[in-house]
Image: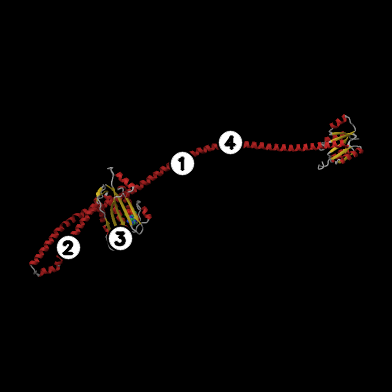
Amino acid sequence: MKNEPIATILIVDDYPDNLRSLAAILTIEGYKVRKAISGKVALETIRSQPPDLILLDIRMPDMDGYQVCLTLKSSPIICDIPVIFLSALDDTASKVKSFSVGGADYISKPFHAEEVIARVENQLRIQKLSQQLIDKNARLQEEIKIRQDVQEKLEKAHFNLEKQARDLRVTNHKLQEALAQLQLTQTEIQQQNEILLQSTQREQEKAQILEETLAKLKYTQSQLIQNEKISALGRMVAGIAHEINNPVSFIHGNIFYVNDYFKNLIELIKFYQKTYPDPTPVIKEIESRIDLEFLIEDSEKLIKSMAVGSQRIQEIVLSLKNFSRQNESELKSVDIHENIDNTLMILQHRLKAVGDRPQIEVIKDYSQLPKINCYAGQLNQVFMNLLSNAIDAVETQPSPRRISIHTALISNLKLLDTVSYATLKIKDNHHQEHNCQSLIIMIADNGQGMSKEIQKNIFEPFFTTKPVGRGTGLGLSISHQIVVEKHGGKLSCISAPGYGSTFIVEIPICA
Ligand SMILES: Nc1ncnc2c1ncn2[C@@H]1O[C@H](COP(=O)(O)OP(=O)(O)OP(=O)(O)O)[C@@H](O)[C@H]1O
Ligand SMILES: [Mg+2]
């Protein structure tokens, strides 16, 4: 009670004694007390400064308590102030009227202090509670309003959400349709891509086949040219051999008779000298002019050297004939050494010393070889290519210029790689177990040698390091083909710059 604000109580009574005694009771109780001597004064003070409670006398001149109360209750600002009527009238009708005009309580005169205080306190408490109720109600109203607002907003949001959901569903549907369309288009594109890819692949395959065919054609054409060159060379060699053969046979055949005739003539001269030791001056003069002694002595040597020379020419002609004959393309049993020698014979002009060009020494290290079944003409082509390359390689080098040829028969299957062996097996039509050996021909030179980069390409058709017009770049590729594909063999090379080159031909021979 002490901490609460002090309540203001207005006492309205036309009897100053009443006012005083009541004010005294309430002031003692700690209330703030205001006083009004008439109804009109009371209304004025109430309007200007509303009290918390009014003690209102019923019987007053001018304006009685009921009228004051009715006026009070008709004004919305002050209608809630509780009014306790004071009256000497103790009848029920007055009390009922008091309540009907809006009075909150009723105190009968004469006053009893305890009753006044109890009723005042009671009204103030009711007033306070109802004020709290009003406040609470107002807060509740406010809360309800807020909740309604929130509810409204929620409903709005819900409505918006539903709308958005509807929109989303529509959009989703549209998207799904678009996606389906897209998937359809994508499938179509993929199909078209596949078709395109396939046709590109086909085109690429075609292009590759065309490229390969073109390369093969080029290669075959060059091979034909090479073959033609070799066979032209063969024909020329055969022609020359044939033309030289007759006169040489004629010379060689007659040398025996020349020698015989010379011997007889010399014998006759010697007999004449013995019989006529003193010849005539004319004969003497002729003897010294022709230097008869020397002539007799030298003619024998002369005829001998002529015989050797013609013999050599005959051998050369034979080699040439052999060389040209072996251009025939069928499989033959040949003496490989003879073939190498014949090839060397053809290349003799490049090996001999001419002018200030020093000779190229050829070292032969031949092993004992049986006759070999091979395509002799084509192997000649290989020897020709390898030896020509070796000559080209040493030609730019200072003396001594050397080419060594080594042959061997190796009975070692390891030397054959499986591919070559398989080729050989396929070629064979007897279908029996073979005792395989390998014929090795090594042609080494002390020329400039080759870098690793060059070695990688030497068997490629048209690869050459020689100046234009000097090399076609086909020699080794054709040789490789002859050795590997025709004979099921192997053609390899060992070389390093500054250390010369060695080419190894390996031909499998099966008994
Ligand atoms: N013995 C060797 N020493 C050094 N380099 C060589 C030897 N043999 C071949 N080569 C190199 O290999 C290349 C290819 O040789 P290949 O015989 O195939 O063609 P080419 O000799 O250039 O021309 P072609 O033989 O058609 O006239 C040569 O240009 C050369 O560079
Ligand atoms: Mg060559």
| Disc 2 residue lies near ligand 1 with CB under 8 A | no
Proximity of marks 3 and 1: CB atoms separated by less than 8 Å: no
| Disc 3 residue lies near ligand 1 with CB under 8 A | no
Proximity of marks 2 and 1: CB atoms separated by less than 8 Å: no
In the rendered image, residue 325, in percent from the top left (x then y), is placed at: 24, 50
**Marks 4 and 2, how far apart at CA:** 124 Å
- What amino acid is at disc 3? Arg
Residue 234's place in the image compared with 23, above or below, is below
- What amino acid is at disc 4? Val
Dot 1: within a 10 Å radius of its alpha carbon, few (fewer than 14), some, or many (20 or more) residues? some
| Disc 1 residue lies near ligand 1 with CB under 8 A | no
- What amino acid is at disc 2? Lys
Q: Mark 3 points at which residue?
A: 401
Q: What element carries label 1?
A: helix
Pointer 3 or 1: first along the chain? 1
Pointer 3 or 4: first along the chain? 4
In the rendered image, residue 423, in percent from the top left (x then y), is placed at: 31, 45
Relative to residue 333, is residue 214 drawn left or right?
A: right
Whether residue 170 is visible here, answered yes or no, is: yes
Pointer 4 or 1: first along the chain? 4
- What amino acid is at disc 1? Asn
Proximity of marks 4 and 2: CB atoms separated by less than 8 Å: no
Q: Name the residue under label 4.
A: 170
Pointer 3 or 2: first along the chain? 2
Residue at 55% from the left image edge and 38% from the top image edge: 175
Specify the label residue 301 is tagged with: 2
Q: Name the residue under label 1.
A: 193
Proximity of marks 3 and 2: CB atoms separated by less than 8 Å: no
**Marks 3 and 1, how far apart at CA:** 65 Å
Pointer 2 or 1: first along the chain? 1
Q: Which of marks 3 and 1 is in front?
A: 3
